[in-house]
Amino acid sequence: GETVQVVAQGSGFSVSGEAQALTPGTEGLPARLRTESGRVITGLTVGPLQENCWIVGAAPRCAIVDPGAESERIFEAVEARGLAPEKILLTHGHVDHIAHCAQVAERYRIGLVIHRADLPFLERPQWPELEALLGARPCPAPERLLEDGETLAVAGLELAVLHTPGHTPGSQCFLVDGCLISGDTLFIPSCGRTDLPGSDPAEMYPSLTQRL
């Protein structure tokens, strides 16, 4: 079948068939993965929880996935490549993935999208101490709520939206050019936590075994 490259939250890239692993850079400019079509996915690890933020697109257009901390580093990565962000994409609504949405949205005057089931995470505080640690600001209201199975056209790409509940009710993955941006649904070699408010191990199992 088709080879899928997994862009996992916890461990960078795992490239099926090549036994190759790339981890987003933690110093300077981040690691880069170029897919067969020539489009680029760039990742950098941000914040004290080591959350992975992704920059995806067909240059010079791009979208920013999960800007969870250190927005200044995200700006540097975007602007060093001469990219023009068009959208913020969220794999889910936990604060370590959304804390710097406001900063990114303001700098580039762009909106964000999230699965509708995770909208409540954007509308109320989650963990005040963690929000303070991350320098979080209130997240802007999404300009659109995503649904499972739709195709999202952004930054010169077409991303398939896969609803993968379990870690949160509205966790979702984005599949583009054989690359899966998996957020906290799928790690290497594990999966996201299911002991947090809104998590459900009974939902996670079919997400991992049937959806991905």
Image: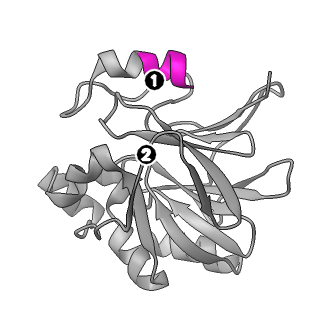
Mark sitting earlier along the chain (2/1): 2
Crowdedness of circle 2 by 10 Å Cα count: few (<14), some, many (20+)?
some
Which residue shows up at 30% across the image and 35% down it? Answer: 169
Label tally: 2
Relative height, residue 36 to residue 57 (above, below): above
Residue on which the image places disc 1: 207
Res 147 label: 2
Res 44 label: none
What amino acid is at disc 1?
Ser
What amino acid is at disc 2?
Glu
Which residue shows up at 43% across the image and 54% down it? Answer: 90
Inspect the magenta stretch and tell me whether residue 137 lies in it.
no
Q: Where residue 148 appears, x then y in whole percent? A: 47, 40
Q: Quadrant of residue 124?
A: bottom left
Element type at marker 2?
loop
Residue 94 visible, this angle: no
Magenta residues, start to end: 206-212
Relative height, residue 128 to residue 106 (above, below): above
